[in-house]
Amino acid sequence: MSEYGLPQIVTEKVPGPKSRELLKRRDEAIPGALCGNTYPICIKRGDGAILEDLDGNRFLDWIGGVGVLNIGYSNQEVIEAVKEQSDKYFHTFFNVVVHEGYVKLAEKFNKLMPVRGEDKKTYFANSGAEADENAIKVAKAYTKRSHIICFSGAFHGRTNLTMALTAKKSYAIGMGPFPEGIYRADYPYMYRAPKGLEEGEAIQYYIDRLKKVINEETRPEDVAAVLMEPVQGEGGFIPAPIEYVKALRRFCDEHGILLIADEVQCGNCRTGKYFASEYWAEAGVAPDIIATAKSMGAGIPISAITASKEIMDAVIPGTIGGTYCGNPLAAQAALKTLEIMTRDDYAGKAAHIGEILMKEYGKMKEKYPVIGDVRGIGAMIGMEFVKDKESKEPYPEFVNGMIQTALQKGLLLENAGSAGNVIRFLAPLCITDEQLEMGLKIYEESILETMKKLNIKN
């Protein structure tokens, strides 16, 4: 358990004076694009699911480094593993000098990753965007095709290619032109499916939309891969229905198209499985390639791309790799993180957290008119706020107000969704039941106070 226990605000208001001083220095030294005011938090130390700022305020973190801190802040075992490696060497360029950590980590991922194929191969990059971009390189090399299908609501990164793949163009203002050959289908967003459709009809609607894009905007024989998040992150914490994935898998197989699962955010035990694609594999529709990152290294940058030997060995030498990819320190952090998550059943922790959240969130949904939907898998859960449950008009103003209210009470929340009207849950999976209970108390208080500020009657 965290030595900090529960959140506590000791200054009259957040930020306190020491944090304000650092924020002032930040604004003078750092590009304005990186100096937002939503979170005036300056960290002194973190432990478990709690961070302490420079003024001694303690916050319960339900953002978790945007999905990076599944095993929490400053895990001592990871610290020791990285220290031990740093005594030996910091870096090798793997293409020139092989280090065992890279090989050992690849061997473990080859056993762990739920992709198609008996024999698998893995290589490493530094970030989620790099993982997605490299997964596409692999797919193009194997299929000898150039087109990619992605989805509405998708977020895949901020490189030139991944900005093109990302649906929300506020992440790409003024950054074009972008690569050609990228086509976007409608993600199966069941809460916002056309009115009157039953679940099966809604799934068929989204499959028909996908086929329309592939058949009218490109050709199946030109498509290398479909890139999909098993649970959309920035798009609003939307799980892909398994029946949709089954139909998608059949279509891909009929046309020789690879299926890539972007598990940058939903991987590493977040959804109640080590990888969300395990749910797909159990249904007989495993992806061909998985890209993952975020919590893989407990905060040290590392990402992975895994596929069958047949697919991986189609890649032409020189087209993948990079100076820092699979860095020895990052590899040791990832190895220790994998050991901890497996040994301590972090997937089980996520399932336990999810059960509590879905129960309590469900009660809130029944009580408050601003909550339109609650959804997710494991401990990756989103609550969607609307102005009216019938019209489902997004209510981003409510979410923004609620985030600021909760922050002053010691709870860190973040929005999601194309309209910014979803609050995501990404707390470290080492959060205690007592901390979770306190977080839910602050969360509900913040809903009520925001309703009052906006003159919304319950």
Image (cartoon, helix red, strand yellow):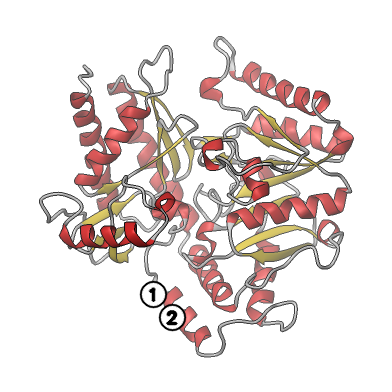
Q: Secondary structure at mark 1?
A: helix
Residue occupied by mark 2: 80
In this picture, residue 61 sits left or right of residue 186:
left
Q: How many marks?
A: 2
- Which is more toward the observer, 372 or 31? 31
Residue 173 to residue 311: above or below: above
Question: For the residues marked 1 and 2, what is the alpha-carbon distance in whole angstroms?
Answer: 6 Å
Please say whether residue 6 is visible from this viewpoint: yes
Residue occupied by mark 1: 76
* Image disc number at residue 423: none
Q: Residues within 10 Å of mark 2 (few under 14, many from 20)?
A: some
**Identity of the amino acid at label 1?**
Gln
Residue 444 to residue 429: above or below: above
In this picture, residue 317 sits left or right of residue 134:
right
**Identity of the amino acid at label 2?**
Glu
Which image quarter is the N terminus in? bottom left
Please say whether residue 1 is visible from this viewpoint: no
In this picture, residue 122 sits left or right of residue 241:
right
In this picture, residue 87 sits left or right of residue 400:
right
- Which is more toward the observer, 428 or 328? 328
- Which is more toward the observer, 358 or 263? 263
Q: Residues within 10 Å of mark 1 (few under 14, many from 20)?
A: few
Q: Secondary structure at mark 2?
A: helix
Q: Give percent across and percent down for residue 83.
A: 46, 83
Q: Is mark 1 in CB contact (under 8 Å) with mark 2?
A: yes
Residue at (54% x, 48% y) in the render: 266
